[in-house]
Image (cartoon, helix red, strand yellow):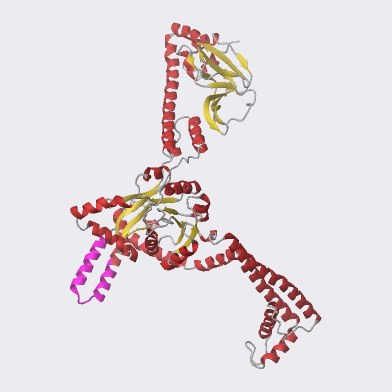
Amino acid sequence: MTANNSENQKRKTTTSEIGSDKSIQSMDENIGELNKFSDLEIIQSITDDEENIGKRVGTLPLKKIFSKVISFYRVNEFFRYAIWSILLILVSTTALTIVEYDMFKESVTGHVGKTFLFGGENPNWLDTFFHTFWWSVVTFTTVGYGDVSPVTHLGKFLTIIVMLLNFGVVTMLGGAVASVLVAQRLKGDDTLEESKFKEHLVIAGWNNFVPSILKIIDANHDSISQVILVNEMESEPMQRSIAGFGFERLEISHIPGNFTQELILKKAFLERATTLMILPDNTGLLPHEEPDEDKTVLTCLTAKAIAESCNVIAHVINPENVSHLQRANVNEIVIPDAHVPHLLAKHVTDPGVPQFFDDLILQEEKDKGLQEVPIPRSLTGQTHEKISAFFKFKHNWLLVGYTIQKAGFSLEEQMGDSGTPLIRNMIKEQLDGAGINLTNDEHVKVEINPADDYTIDEKHRALVLR
Amino acid sequence: MNPTAEQIQKINYFRKVPLNICEQIASVVEIQDCEPREQLLMEGGTGNTMILIFQGQVEVSKNMMVKTASGITTSRKPIIRLETTDPPPTTDPINKATVSVVQSPAFGIGEFSLVLDDAIRTANVHATTSIQYGILKLDDFSNIVKDNPEVGGSVYFEVAKSAVQNLATASADISNLTQAFFFALTR
């Protein structure tokens, strides 16, 4: 298969670039490079698999839309009554069409003349049905033109039932509209719809970095799309700022309030979130005032009490707070000034390296630069060399390393079956009673430029230069 | 009434002791009956006697300090239950076992008393069924060993094995407790 591919590629190269010996030579060299990798069949099969998955995914939206409609029907009272109204109109139309067929047929002939939508010169049952439907809607909406009305006793009796039911349905519909409006007013604008949020990002705190952070996340199409901002800014200016960002992909919501409070974080559905980012909060501060970093530690403690598995990233200005945050079980800490000495020194020792970092960061905005991407499952167990080849030839990305999701330290696993069960059980009971989980959180390790024979497992994700 | 030499030989510490010596041991042991819930050994106490259980089930437990809703209290935590199989207990246990039940034809407890004077009891032992047991005193056993030094080797070897196993378990317990201690401190 590899040989055939190479031949095919050779043929294509020859026809498309005939007359350019240099180009042909360079392509041949590339093909030679490709052939060095014995498992290109695997890469090809993965590419095919991915395409097939793409095709399969294409059938999903209909199902998704249907389930969305169903869930909307369940939660939205207004929609529910509207559906029932339409059903009632259709049922009454059908019943009246059957019972008063002659009358409606005569009426439609008198009204429309000789041009019928379905029946040509003479009205057929569809024209009659449509005419009855017109009558039903006119009656339901209480407009009542009176251009047509039932004549038989049975028809009139059915009309009475329809009008009485209509009275109930219209009342309920009006009530639903009113109740939705009243409920919204009572709840305030800070309550979000829970079903919309899952595996989202919560950003607690507000400072000048937030728009840039969101811009970079927005540029990465494989990343989170739902973001909830939690800070003490007023809703209206915040909503205006969010609208002003003009993000392509991100859906941003806002919860106003003190994010150190459990209630406020729960409003942001933290237990369903993937990541919580805690930033130094500049809300309400005067220009010379420093943000209170105790809030960051407190928020981390509260967040871990609500959702222990949530990945908490804290941005701290004062390195003294690092130990507090570590005790609060934070997953990642970002200290902005930590890189400054290194970058300054590199300007002297390795000129170009700091500029390289700058370029990487600037490229983020164009969905370029250094990014973490998943590795196709079928490549699990392969070596770094082959995975590197996959990204190079499939996407033209340079694989620079891996992030590895490492399981946290588990005391239970560590103890195993050693010692007496009595002591082991006592340790578990006592730590559990003190609210201490026996397992530490997972954390991310980075492996940069490993050896060619380095083997990856399902916990690896690729760090690529796009 | 004294046990038979065969009954003595069923106990793992005496399984390699010749039958004629077991007879001598049996002659200094007297079979006694004990009701369920009766305590045979108390943790922290001392004694010069080994208890030989010929029939029935006993529970071994330890006193532990635990933190409960009402504060720190001492609680008796069961470790293991030992049950004879030859013959099995005559009555059902007084309550359901919450720990594993180890079965053997017959067994001995307080074996360190065969080596040490006033050995400290490291756990509580109480009957969970009606039991038949005998008491082997250190002095009586020492006299038998004096007359038959070869017996001492096999019995003391079994006691030493038990001691080494206990030591390994204790070492693992210390390791687990140390890890738990640091784990709790760093949270």
Magenta highlight on residue A7: yes
Q: Can the viewer see residue B159?
A: yes
Residue at the (46%, 34%) spot, across then down: A417
In the image, taking residue A348 as reference, residue A442 lies left or right, namely right
Percent of width and height locating residue A196:
52, 61
Q: Can the viewer see residue A247?
A: no
- State the residue in front, A283 or B96: A283
* Main SS, magenta residues: helix
- State the residue in front, A229 or A101: A229
Q: Is residue B156 above or below residue A287?
A: above
Percent of width and height locating residue A273:
47, 55
- State the residue in front, A68 or A141: A141
Q: Is residue A332 above or below residue A144?
A: above
Task: Give the quadrant of residue A129.
Answer: bottom right
Magenta residues, start to end:
A6-35
Percent of width and height locating residue A453:
28, 51
Q: Is residue B59 above or below residue A354?
A: above
Q: How many marks?
A: 0
